[in-house]
Image (spheres, coloured by chain):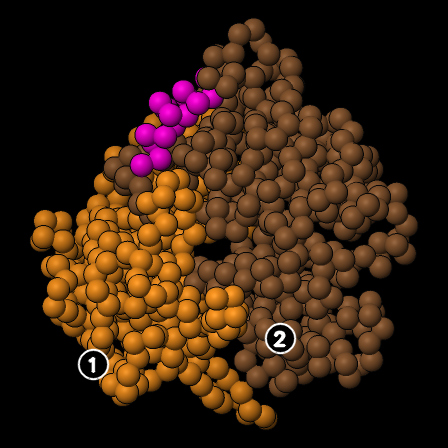
Amino acid sequence: MSDKLTLPKPQGPVDGAAETLLSVEGLTKHFPIYGGFPIKRKVGAVQAVDGVDLTVGVGESVGLVGESGCGKSTTGRLITRLLEPTAGKVTYAGQDITHASRRQMAPVRSEIQMIFQDPYSSLNPRQTVGTIIKSPMEVNGINPKGGVENRVRELLELVGLNPEHYNRFPHEFSGGQRQRIGVARALSLNPKLIVADEPVSALDVSIQAQVVNLLQKVQEEMGIAFLFIAHDLAIVRHFSQRLAVMYLGKVVEVGDRDSIYNRPRHPYTHALLSAVPEVALDDETEDRERIRLSGDVPSPIHPPSGCRFRTRCWKAQDKCATSEPPLVQISGNRENHLTACHFPEDPTTEARDADIVLDPALAALEKEGE
Amino acid sequence: MTTLTKTEGERAPSGPEAFLSVRDLRVRFSTEDGIVKAVDGLSFDVERGKTLGIVGESGSGKSVTNLTVLGLHNPKTATVEGEIVLDGKELVTATEKEMEKLRGNKVAMIFQDPLTALSPYYTVGRQIAEPFMKHTGASKKEAKLRAIEMLDKVGIPQPAMRFEDYPHQFSGGMRQRAMIAMSLICNPDLLIADEPTTALDVTVQAQILDLLKDLQQEFGSAIIFITHDLGVISKMADDLLVMYSGRAVERGSVREVLRAPQHPYTWGLLSSMPRLGGDTAQALTPIPGSPPSLLNPPSGCPFHPRCGFTSEVSGNRCSGERPELPAGRGAACHLDDAQKSTFFIEQIKPRLG
């Protein structure tokens, strides 16, 4: 693959203020596909993640957004080393952990924790809440002051649950409460980095805010760095200072919150933002641009050549098919705002003179209606 | 605009323009743990060509209501009381045979998860053509042509080839398009869309929502749009019904409900939702607690255990007396109108950013 092309200089942390905790360079994960008879051979690969560069500073919250199948969850799993990277480098606190062995990983594992999406399947139904929360401590041989049980009660209280519920089972809790148990488990080892993979998307609207606020409190008070993986752009915006937008296994745009949400350059970021349904509380919100892409994300087994977004992009030209745009700071971008696009859009999200409607059915219906 | 009804529980003759009118609907399920009151005294009307949005959290009874309208509840476990009148026809007492004639013909439904709603065993084309053959008596060939026309209309490329495909060969967005084609094939007067875009990505969701809206203009169907997402509803609906614990707590036009909401639950929903233009320095204001159990819902107003405004109501009316939903625009809340607007303007609106 043309990894070389996509490898810009690793981005430093914002303003150089925060120290880099985790950095990822050219991270790649291809899942092989086997086929054929009688001997199964590798016939292809799902290029789930293909050359991702990312840094997370100490205590920083970085958002990773994109649609399903763009590789954001795989990236999270590669960083926590739940999956073995095909290529690339993962550096945690100055230590290369890309292919670290179990034993080498052991001290690092306790510092990188994960919060999962589904609070129903990520807790063992046969264990009490107490057992669930204390097991990471037991596995890592940690004996906190005042005993393990005390610590568990402390954690339960911290995440807003009643410490008396120590002996209850997960089924006795609601979805939001279960997600709090998941947070308590992640916090039990005093981690430095938490990878939160869609931590609120399985919850009801009124409960989502409770968990987001809890995570925010945890992040601010305990100085834990977060990699917040989500598809909901409004929630990521609320939670993360810096963001990376992924499309088909690649990061297409990285920048601070304001750059991504108010001055996006990549057409995909524009499309993504314009697709978010916003409640119109006043007439102001109506003035956003309207972009309707056509079709779905292409298969990551045979991703388009060159720029991967070109098949759905309204600005695509021949160049997009032949050369892959590097992720760089293009002219007009602020510092640390990198975009991988040959023909970037203007840095604004305001309504255009004409809507961009690429969907053929939609375009036909709208033409008829005029 | 949908004609909004008189006080709940009261029998109101459905006006000539109300195409579907539901009066004091009560749906109960008997379970091992007791009786679940999934819908508890719900009334609403839907007018031809308009969209009624129903929002609520999981367990608020929004899906059950609409399954009942279609007669898709299990008659062995569910008791249905009240009145559902569709175009002058009473549906609660209708026989299964009569319902069969309506389903897919006059009333159609789009389900949340198109992968489970489509049968993996039959081709997409056959499933789309089936209701057309059943209800119009068309031949297989005519039905196929019609199905291909519909597939084209909803934006499936090469519809004639795709007709022969199975659901697993379609992507999520395309499956939902196929569902839409299936539901619209008989020109239904009423389309019930139950969280039709929840399983989809945002960019695909935006396509599907716009497609539904444009198709509605062409077909003139009334739509009941069920969702938990206030953003989606503000794009889709003309009128809005906010449900909580099996009851409607607020209704009005979308503009009224979202710009000047009156019920503390609607306030809570709005302020717990982060917005793209909101102030990120301001913490979200979640609704405390969790949705009530439908086995033994709280006395009085079902929202009172989570409500921050109960102290503003004199006496113990919130926990003692169930507030009625007034006719037309209004909210089922004991706060008086002046309080509702002052609290919203002074306390809630500034938080919305």
Give percent across and percent down for residue B97: 90, 56
Task: Give residue B279's position: percent from left, percent from top.
Answer: 28, 39
Residue at image mark 1: A4
Disc number for residue B90? none
Query: Which residue occupies the foreground of this view, B330 or B163?
Result: B330
Q: In which quarter of the image is the C terminus of chain B?
A: top left
Residue kind at label 2, given as amino acid type:
Leu
- Crowding at dot 1, Cα within 10 Å, few <14 / some 14-19 / many 20+, comes out as few
Q: Residue drawn at (41%, 44%), measured in percent from left and top?
A: A280
Residue at the location (52% across, 17% down)?
Answer: B335
Question: Which residue is pictured at 63% across the width and 85% down the height?
Answer: B160
In the image, residue A360 above or below residue A141? below
Q: Can residue A229 be seen in this view?
A: no
Colour representing chain A: orange
Chain bearing mark 2: B
Residue B315 location in percent, x, y? 56, 6
Comparing marks 2 and 1, which lies closer to the viewer?
A: 2
Residue farthest to the left? A16
Instruction: Say which quadrant the N terminus of chain B sits in.
Output: top right
A45 or A268: nearer the viewer:
A268
Q: In which quarter of the image is residue A303?
A: bottom left
- Callout 1: SS: helix
Q: Which of A282 and A295 is in front in this view?
A: A282
Q: Which residue lies furthest to the top in this view?
A: B315
Q: Can residue B129 be seen in this view?
A: yes
Q: x and y percent of residue B325 in the render?
A: 63, 26
Q: What residue type is labelled 1?
A: Lys
